[in-house]
Protein backbone atom coordinates (compact mmCIF):
# COMPACT_ATOMS: atom_id res chain seq x y z
CA UNK A 1 0.00 0.00 0.00
CA UNK A 2 1.57 3.37 -0.95
CA UNK A 3 2.08 6.07 1.63
CA UNK A 4 0.70 9.49 0.73
CA UNK A 5 2.11 12.78 1.96
CA UNK A 6 0.22 16.04 1.71
CA UNK A 7 0.31 19.39 3.44
CA UNK A 8 -2.57 21.02 5.27
CA UNK A 9 -3.55 24.44 6.54
CA UNK A 10 -2.99 23.91 10.26
CA UNK A 11 -0.72 26.37 12.07
CA UNK A 12 2.76 25.64 10.71
CA UNK A 13 5.96 25.47 12.74
CA UNK A 14 8.76 27.91 12.01
CA UNK A 15 9.32 31.43 10.83
CA UNK A 16 8.13 32.99 7.59
CA UNK A 17 9.79 35.62 5.39
CA UNK A 18 8.03 37.75 2.84
CA UNK A 19 10.22 39.23 0.11
CA UNK A 20 8.39 42.09 -1.61
CA UNK A 21 9.38 44.63 -4.23
CA UNK A 22 8.62 48.32 -3.74
CA UNK A 23 8.14 49.01 -7.47
CA UNK A 24 4.41 49.21 -8.26
CA UNK A 25 3.87 49.57 -4.51
CA UNK A 26 0.20 50.44 -4.93
CA UNK A 27 -0.15 46.77 -5.95
CA UNK A 28 2.58 45.08 -3.91
CA UNK A 29 1.40 46.61 -0.63
CA UNK A 30 -2.00 44.98 -1.17
CA UNK A 31 -0.31 41.64 -1.92
CA UNK A 32 1.73 42.03 1.27
CA UNK A 33 -1.38 42.78 3.35
CA UNK A 34 -3.07 39.69 1.90
CA UNK A 35 -0.08 37.47 2.68
CA UNK A 36 0.36 38.70 6.25
CA UNK A 37 -3.36 38.47 6.98
CA UNK A 38 -3.44 34.89 5.66
CA UNK A 39 -0.44 33.78 7.69
CA UNK A 40 -1.90 35.27 10.89
CA UNK A 41 -5.33 33.75 10.23
CA UNK A 42 -3.64 30.35 9.91
CA UNK A 43 -1.94 30.64 13.27
CA UNK A 44 1.43 32.20 12.46
CA UNK A 45 2.34 34.73 15.15
CA UNK A 46 3.17 38.30 14.09
CA UNK A 47 6.64 38.00 15.57
CA UNK A 48 7.32 34.92 13.38
CA UNK A 49 6.94 36.97 10.18
CA UNK A 50 9.77 39.06 8.72
CA UNK A 51 9.27 41.35 5.71
CA UNK A 52 12.17 42.13 3.38
CA UNK A 53 11.73 44.89 0.81
CA UNK A 54 13.79 45.43 -2.32
CA UNK A 55 13.63 48.10 -5.03
CA UNK A 56 12.06 46.09 -7.84
CA UNK A 57 10.96 42.73 -9.13
CA UNK A 58 14.27 42.07 -10.87
CA UNK A 59 16.00 42.16 -7.46
CA UNK A 60 13.66 39.62 -5.85
CA UNK A 61 15.61 36.44 -6.77
CA UNK A 62 18.85 37.69 -5.20
CA UNK A 63 17.07 38.82 -2.05
CA UNK A 64 15.15 35.57 -1.82
CA UNK A 65 18.35 33.54 -2.19
CA UNK A 66 20.01 35.45 0.66
CA UNK A 67 16.95 35.02 2.88
CA UNK A 68 16.79 31.32 2.03
CA UNK A 69 20.48 30.76 2.72
CA UNK A 70 20.08 32.22 6.23
CA UNK A 71 18.37 28.96 7.22
CA UNK A 72 16.01 30.87 9.53
CA UNK A 73 12.77 30.34 7.63
CA UNK A 74 10.42 27.43 7.02
CA UNK A 75 8.60 29.44 4.36
CA UNK A 76 9.41 32.33 2.06
CA UNK A 77 6.72 34.16 0.11
CA UNK A 78 7.86 36.27 -2.84
CA UNK A 79 5.67 39.18 -3.96
CA UNK A 80 6.00 41.65 -6.81
CA UNK A 81 4.18 43.14 -9.78
CA UNK A 82 5.38 43.54 -13.35
CA UNK A 83 2.99 45.37 -15.65
CA UNK A 84 3.51 45.27 -19.42
CA UNK A 85 4.47 48.55 -21.03
CA UNK A 86 5.31 49.55 -24.56
CA UNK A 87 8.81 48.03 -24.57
CA UNK A 88 10.23 44.50 -24.18
CA UNK A 89 11.43 45.40 -20.66
CA UNK A 90 8.44 43.49 -19.20
CA UNK A 91 9.55 40.23 -20.84
CA UNK A 92 13.07 40.46 -19.49
CA UNK A 93 12.10 41.39 -15.95
CA UNK A 94 9.23 38.89 -15.68
CA UNK A 95 11.24 36.06 -17.23
CA UNK A 96 14.37 36.57 -15.17
CA UNK A 97 12.36 36.95 -11.97
CA UNK A 98 10.45 33.73 -12.59
CA UNK A 99 13.61 31.79 -13.48
CA UNK A 100 15.48 33.17 -10.50
CA UNK A 101 12.74 32.44 -7.98
CA UNK A 102 12.33 28.95 -9.44
CA UNK A 103 16.04 28.32 -8.98
CA UNK A 104 15.92 29.53 -5.38
CA UNK A 105 12.84 27.40 -4.65
CA UNK A 106 14.63 24.34 -5.99
CA UNK A 107 17.73 24.98 -3.88
CA UNK A 108 15.81 25.94 -0.75
CA UNK A 109 13.80 22.72 -0.77
CA UNK A 110 16.99 20.66 -0.78
CA UNK A 111 19.03 22.64 1.74
CA UNK A 112 20.03 21.58 5.25
CA UNK A 113 17.03 23.54 6.61
CA UNK A 114 14.46 23.00 3.84
CA UNK A 115 12.25 25.98 3.12
CA UNK A 116 9.20 26.38 0.93
CA UNK A 117 9.45 29.28 -1.54
CA UNK A 118 6.21 30.40 -3.17
CA UNK A 119 5.72 32.72 -6.13
CA UNK A 120 3.31 35.62 -5.71
CA UNK A 121 4.67 37.85 -8.46
CA UNK A 122 2.02 39.28 -10.76
CA UNK A 123 2.84 39.50 -14.47
CA UNK A 124 -0.03 41.48 -15.96
CA UNK A 125 -0.78 43.15 -19.26
CA UNK A 126 -2.61 46.08 -17.66
CA UNK A 127 -2.84 48.00 -14.41
CA UNK A 128 -6.46 46.89 -14.15
CA UNK A 129 -5.44 43.22 -14.22
CA UNK A 130 -2.91 43.85 -11.45
CA UNK A 131 -5.48 45.67 -9.32
CA UNK A 132 -7.96 42.81 -9.80
CA UNK A 133 -5.34 40.24 -8.67
CA UNK A 134 -4.36 42.32 -5.65
CA UNK A 135 -7.73 41.95 -4.00
CA UNK A 136 -10.48 43.47 -6.12
CA UNK A 137 -12.03 40.84 -8.44
CA UNK A 138 -9.68 37.88 -8.71
CA UNK A 139 -8.86 37.43 -5.03
CA UNK A 140 -5.51 38.39 -3.59
CA UNK A 141 -2.55 36.56 -5.11
CA UNK A 142 -0.45 37.45 -2.04
CA UNK A 143 -2.92 35.55 0.12
CA UNK A 144 -2.87 32.65 -2.33
CA UNK A 145 0.94 32.50 -2.21
CA UNK A 146 0.77 32.47 1.60
CA UNK A 147 -1.73 29.56 1.62
CA UNK A 148 0.49 27.60 -0.77
CA UNK A 149 3.50 28.32 1.44
CA UNK A 150 1.71 27.08 4.56
CA UNK A 151 0.67 23.89 2.80
CA UNK A 152 4.20 23.25 1.52
CA UNK A 153 5.82 23.96 4.91
CA UNK A 154 3.47 21.41 6.47
CA UNK A 155 4.17 18.92 3.67
CA UNK A 156 7.94 19.31 4.09
CA UNK A 157 7.49 18.74 7.85
CA UNK A 158 5.67 15.44 7.20
CA UNK A 159 8.28 13.98 4.89
CA UNK A 160 10.53 11.23 6.23
CA UNK A 161 13.65 12.67 7.89
CA UNK A 162 12.14 16.15 8.01
CA UNK A 163 13.25 17.34 11.43
CA UNK A 164 14.35 20.96 10.98
CA UNK A 165 17.62 22.17 12.40
CA UNK A 166 17.91 25.48 14.15
Image (cartoon, helix red, strand yellow):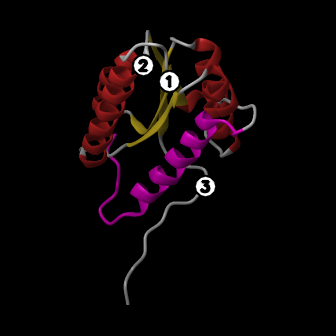
Q: Which mark is residue 57?
A: 2
Under circle 1, the secondary element is strand
Mark 3 highlights which residue? 9
> Where does label 1 land, which residue?
80
Labels 1 & 2 near each other (Cβ < 8 A): yes
Percent position of residue 133, x then y: 64, 33
User: Where is residue 88 drawn, in percent x and y?
Assistant: 36, 18
Circle 2 SS class: helix
Residue farthest to the bottom, as pictured: 1
Say which label, 2 or 3, has the lower sequence index. 3
Residue depicted at x 75% and y 31%: 136
**Mark 3 → mark 1, Cα distance in angstroms:** 24 Å
Q: Residue at x 65, y 44 (%)?
A: 43
Q: Main secondary structure of the magenta part?
A: helix
Q: Residues within 10 Å of mark 3 (few under 14, many from 20)?
A: some
Tell me, yes or no, if residue 67 can be seen here.
Answer: no
- How far is the residue under mark 1 from the one under mark 2? 6 Å
How many C-alpha atoms fall within 10 Å of the one at disc 1: few (<14), some, or many (≥20)? many
Q: Which residues are magenta?
A: 138-166
Amino acid sequence: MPRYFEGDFLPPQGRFAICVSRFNSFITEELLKGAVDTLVRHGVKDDAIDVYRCPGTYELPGLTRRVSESGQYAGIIVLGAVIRGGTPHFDYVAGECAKGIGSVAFSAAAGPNPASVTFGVLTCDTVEQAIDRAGVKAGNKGAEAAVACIEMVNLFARMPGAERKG
